[in-house]
Amino acid sequence: MKLKDLLKNVEITSIIGNVDVDIKNVCIDTKSITEKSLFICINGANYDGHDCVEKAREYGACALIVEREVDSSLPQIKVKNSRKAMSTVASNFYGNADKKLRIIGVTGTNGKTTTSHFITAIMTYANYKCGLIGTLGVFYDNKPIEATLTTPDPLILHKIFSDMVECGVEVVIMEVSAHAVYYDKLYGINFEYVAFTNFTQDHLDFFKNMERYQEAKLKLFRENQIGCVVSNSDDDLCRKIEKIFDKTITYGID
């Protein structure tokens, strides 16, 4: 695939070099680089891909996506947010398979796994061919894949979507973690439905306080295209979701 085609819908600030080059692989880890790879420089907590561009070139990378200009002979596509760019590029690389699926997201502190499995069972009983992505793994077409994260990274996630389409999957039910939303793993994905279970104290080792954790949850409803939200009205966060998204079906006990 041509690099210029992979960049469709990517928010680009500048381009240095020729984008009319062939790309056969997309990666963020130098260990995954093969010939004609596009290397996306991610600035993480313990690793900054911008510091590894020379190694990436030696291993076979032929182009870079960067957030800041680097000293390299390779073509550079400068973007504001490498993580969002990665999600868009991953979708393009795998033929925008996510747009060919009906995707149902389940988010909340507790109950994501149980709810996802309930929905999958109901949809399967209704004769839909389903795929399931979550804490216990990825399941579709009798292909169980062991889980490494609740919500896979974009390059893995869109590869899974592509294979699901090839296998005839119609509906995907997936758990959506706050970490995934925070890191823009789901950027650009359209959800037919998103179910919200509840919001309680968790992950403060990462988010440090409840306000930041809450903001990560709300970001999903602010930034993703969603057809309809099903929300727990017994939870105070439901009111904030309803202010962001007016097409909300509520459920609850009290």
Image (cartoon, rainbow, N blue to C red):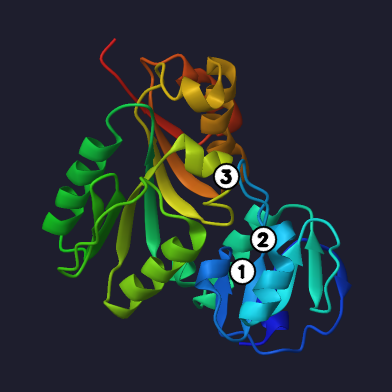
- Vertical placement of residue 148 versus 108, above or below: below
**Residue reaching furthest top?**
254
226 relative position to 23: left or right = left
Residue at image x 27%, y 76%? 168
Spatial CA span between label 1 and label 3 = 15 Å
Q: Is residue 183 left or right of residue 202?
A: right
* Residue appearing at x 47%, y 55% in the figure: 153
Q: Is residue 81 left or right of residue 23?
A: right
Q: CA distance from mark 3 to mark 2?
A: 12 Å
Q: Position of residue 160 (x, y in %)?
A: 37, 67
**In contact (CB < 8 Å): disc 1 and disc 2:** yes
Per the image, the residue denoted by label 1 is: 89
The first of marks 3 and 2 along the sequence is 2
* Residue type at tag 2: Ala
User: Looking at the picture, does residue 184 appear above or below residue 92?
Assistant: above
Quarter of the rendering occupied by the N terminus: bottom right
Q: Amino acid at mark 3?
A: Tyr
Whether residue 155 can be seen here: yes
Q: State the residue position of label 3.
A: 183
Of residue 5 and residue 122, the one placed in the foreground of this image is: 5
- The three-letter code of the residue at mark 1 reads Val
- Residue, disc 2: 85
**Front-most of residues 253 and 106:** 106
Considering only vertical position in the picture, is 244 above or below 119? Answer: above
